[in-house]
Image: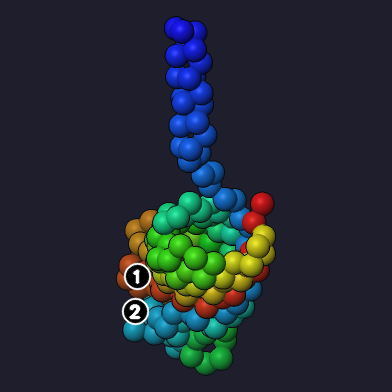
Amino acid sequence: MRARHLLIILLLISMVTLLIPKPVAAIPAVTFVLGSMIGDSLSEVLQVRLGTITEGFENAPILGGRMGWSLFPFAVEGSLLYSPSAIDSTGGDSFGASIMYAEVEAQMLILPGPVSPFFGGGIGLHSIKLQVGSTPRETVIGYVFGGGLRATFGTLGLRVDIKDHITPLKITELDPNFVDALGTAVSNNLHNIEFSGGVTIKF
């Protein structure tokens, strides 16, 4: 009798165990990114050079990739993006200024379905290389804020992103060659806006 009760208890425990939902693993995904960067206008704060005033970064393509994990309603994502932009100056003496963003971002997914808007923010390294003179480069800690829309079709997906990449340039911490080449007179936050699309592959 006792053995029978013990067997029934074991069966009940087994059934309850099967009914308890297993924790869902975060889904990894890779996104290939291509889009446009709307360059920041800087003519009001860049006043160092005589005769020419830096007007800002040119609009340019932006490309790269993202890798992230999502578990509704949260997601975390790393991005590596590159833009072959340029600096516009009065007098027509523009020069190349490539920008690279290596960022980590936390995101909030708004809807649980296959199509979901999202928003988020993060931090990372922003590297600017000026193609003039000694080709000075500066790498600083920057920030990113924005959102977009994800659409998933099985293991494939599409997404659209609109993000503000904020790059603080503090005069006292910059290489003098970089300051002279850029023409900056005061500390400033660059706001380069990303409009991009991407193809996502889930694993």
Q: Is residue 116 left or right of residue 121?
A: right
Q: Residue at the location (54% across, 51% down)?
A: 69
Element type at mark 2: loop
Residue beneath disc 1: 188
Q: Residue at the location (63% across, 73% down)?
A: 34
Q: Where is residue 72? Give x, y as percent.
A: 45, 55
- Residues tagged 1 and 2 counted as in contact (Cβ below 8 A): yes
What amino acid type is highlighted by mark number 2? Answer: Val
Q: Earlier in the sequence, mark 1 or mark 2?
A: 2
What amino acid type is highlighted by mark number 1? Answer: Asn
Separation of residues labelled 1 and 2 (CA atoms): 8 Å
Query: Which residue is at the front of the view, 49 or 26?
Result: 26
Q: Where is residue 77? Give x, y as percent.
A: 51, 55
Query: Which residue is at the front of the view, 194 or 60?
Result: 194
Residue beneath disc 2: 45
Q: Where is residue 188? Give x, y as percent.
A: 34, 70
Q: Which residue appears farthest toward the bottom when viewing the image? A: 91
Q: Residue at the location (59% across, 67% down)?
A: 152
Query: Which residue is at the front of the view, 154 or 31?
Result: 154
Is 92 above or below relative to 100?
below
